[in-house]
Image: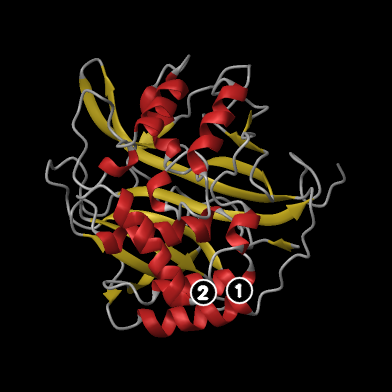
Amino acid sequence: MNASPSQPHPAEWTETQRLLPSVERDLPAGRHQFHKEQMMAQIHEDLRTDRTNARPALAARRRNPFLRRAILVPAGAFALAGAVVAGFALSGGNSEGGTAALATGPALTTRIGVADPKGAPQLLDRISLAAADTSEPAVHDGQFTYIASKVASTYPKTVDGKTTIVSQELHDRRVWMSLDGKDGWLIEAGETSDEGMTLAGPNPVAGAYNALAELPTDPDALLRRIYQESDSNRDPEVPRDQAAFVAIGDLLNESYPPADLNAALYKAAAKIPGVVTVDDAVDAVGRHGIAVARQNDTDGQRTEWIFDRKTLELLGERTVQVKADKDGEFKAGTVMSTSAITQRAVVDGNKEAPGKAS
């Protein structure tokens, strides 16, 4: 199966994602969850090795479902920590060949779309029906899921003691993951060498297809599962409803859920307080759509899932600074993260491109 959104020519960088500040600065409210666990901190340190710019390295962790946000994914389904550590142990954190730093430009900005607090249940119900009607692959042992996307991040960059807010160059990210989550490969410009890095390890990685297939498809049971895990692990500064919304978004954007689970995730999201629709949002390659979103009032950022208006296909995700942060660093309208899903497929081998034999 190959479910691939249409791909217009790359547009301007319309969204980006915040790079987490480096250790000399305190993290702004609401962002502590990405660094709180010792495992993730160690991974970040490993990734800094032989890098000339640590901040972009950290930014990309936000876009890597296999190396980030362990606390927001149901632990019963995903044994994330062991897989991540094992992956780095096998790869040394990077494949040989070094990693070239990504170019940066001015901070990306966008029009802040109008939020409708009443429209989310109806829209999510329509999206759920469309997702349930999507054909899914007849997967078999030995296959790999494949996800290709365009991503970028926005972050503070300090040169000669002067800090400015910059955005990464929009770049490719490709991930292969075995159905059992014990093998995989990552290629991401600025984060791995051209050859990429292994994600192999003895324990399943988060988002593996087999683990997703075991999650409950009853929306209430599924949402309880997500809340239970996020409540036990999230940073207290992150509102529990926001943590649940982000967890669902991670599964939708950065894994390949079976069709019945995909539909259940949307129905579960509709039950989270504070979820709204946004009249217009733009993904990383410039595709406009309607969004389902939720704002984290702690840091003033709104996470938006972007859908094609006609087909209701998920195009990507972005995070927008809706109100300036307390330090005045990030102004309203700053795009903190951007992603665009360009292809999803099931392939027969690791590092195999869709449509090509191993």
Front-lying residue, 279 or 269: 269
Residue extending farthest to the right is 357
Identify the element where label 2 is drawn.
helix
Residue extending farthest to the front is 76
Provide residue 231's location: percent of width, then percent of height: 30, 56
Q: Which mark is residue 260?
A: 1
Left or right: where 177 falls relative to 263: right
What count of labels does the image hold? 2
Q: Confirm whether residue 109 shows in the render.
A: no
Tell me the kind of residue under disc 1: Asp
Sort mark 2 into few (<14), some (14-19) or many (20+) by Cα contacts within 10 Å.
many
Provide residue 180's location: percent of width, then percent of height: 67, 48
Residue shown at 55% from the left, 26% from the top? 88
Q: Disc 2 versus disc 1: distance between alpha carbons?
A: 6 Å
In which quadrant will I find the N terminus? bottom right
In which quadrant will I find the C terminus? top right
Left or right: where 116 falls relative to 246: left
Front-lying residue, 87 or 330: 87
Residue shown at 62% from the left, 43% from the top? 175
**Circles 2, 1 touching at the beta carbon (< 8 Å):** yes
Q: Image height check: is 141 above or below 26?
A: below
Provide residue 269's location: percent of width, then percent of height: 40, 71
Provide residue 258's location: percent of width, then percent of height: 63, 66
Sort mark 1 into few (<14), some (14-19) or many (20+) by Cα contacts within 10 Å.
some
**Which quarter of the picture shows residue 44?**
top left
Identify the element where label 1 is drawn.
helix
According to the image, label 2 marks what residue?
264
